[in-house]
Image (cartoon, rainbow, N blue to C red):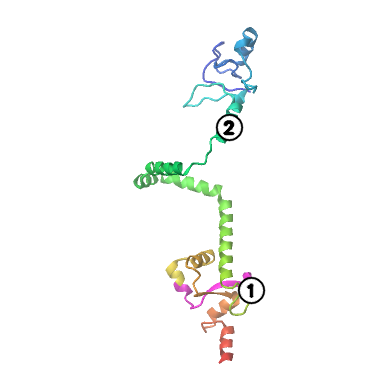
Amino acid sequence: MGHLFEKACIRCKTIYPATREFFAKSQRICKACAEKAAIQFPETVTFYCPSGHPYDAYSVTTPTKSFPYVTRKCKTCDKLAKQEYRRTHSTNPTPEQQEQIKEYRRAHRASPEYMAQYREENKEKLKLQKSANYQKHKADRLERSRQKGQEAKQLVYEHYGNVCVCCGISDQMFLTLDHKNNDGAKHRKENGKMCGVNMCMWIIRNNFPDTIQLLCWNCNAAKQFSGLGMCPHEAERNKEAA
């Protein structure tokens, strides 16, 4: 296994041989020439790095536009050296270094005018990036959203007693939020879409207003369609109390 290099072998001048590997130090040389050189000049040819790792395709860097010259490099030794450097040089900055980092970021932060111009000039590109990113993380986002909604619902229901204030049923599957003053339509008109998770989040942001209560679906529907402004259960209790 080898790499295709842009330049010919320095010995046989063959351009793009099928298999070419680095064997002679700091030289581009094909495998056939390297084998011959190993016999004629064994002191100039080495098949292993100083640490004993073999020079193979993995140990040869591929050419790029910014660095067209191919050099032989033991990537195993390089990886170990980087790990040792990270171990000996702490990546946790001191408070002074953190302030320096913040100051640097503030000084090199793009201006709002530049960002607005960039977004205007790259609308389609940003739209495609946003769509691709959403599709990539769609499942995780939906799961996090579902969990967040369940946590908000649990918090709200527990605050309001987790029980229907009219009939006393406590199964959450039968419970729903209700506006005590029958002003739910006005509330939704003033605050936009207010149902489900959005309603629970609004309640939490507004510190659990006392104008909200828990009713079961039967009592809530009866309150709406009875024409009494209250659940028939409550009307009957008021009549008996009177």
**The quarter of the displayed image where residue 29 is located:** top right
What residue is at 45 percent from the left and 71 percent from the top?
Answer: 187
Q: How many marks?
A: 2
The answer to whether 180 is drawn above or below residue 3 in the figure is below
Left/right placement of residue 122 relative to residue 134 reads left
What residue is at 40 percent from the left and 41 percent from the top?
Answer: 104
- Can you name the residue that lies furthest to the top here? 40
Q: The residue tagged with tag 1: helix, strand or loop? A: loop
Residue type of the residue flagged with mark 2: Glu
Q: The residue tagged with tag 2: helix, strand or loop? A: helix
Q: Position of residue 149 (x, y in %)?
A: 56, 61
Depth check, mark 1 against mark 2: the one in front is: 2
Magenta region, residue range: 171-186
What residue is at 55 percent from the left and 32 percent from the top?
Answer: 85
The answer to whether 15 is drawn above or below residue 123 in the figure is above
Magenta stretch: residue 21 in it? no
User: How far apart are the two marked residues, 1 and 2, measured between alpha carbons?
Assistant: 60 Å
Q: Position of residue 31 (x, y in %)?
A: 62, 16
Q: Position of residue 225 (x, y in %)?
A: 54, 80
- Can you name the residue that lies furthest to the left here? 113
What residue is at 51 percent from the left and 77 percent from the top?
Answer: 180
The answer to whether 176 is drawn above or below residue 13 in the figure is below
Classify the position of the N terminus by image quarter: top right
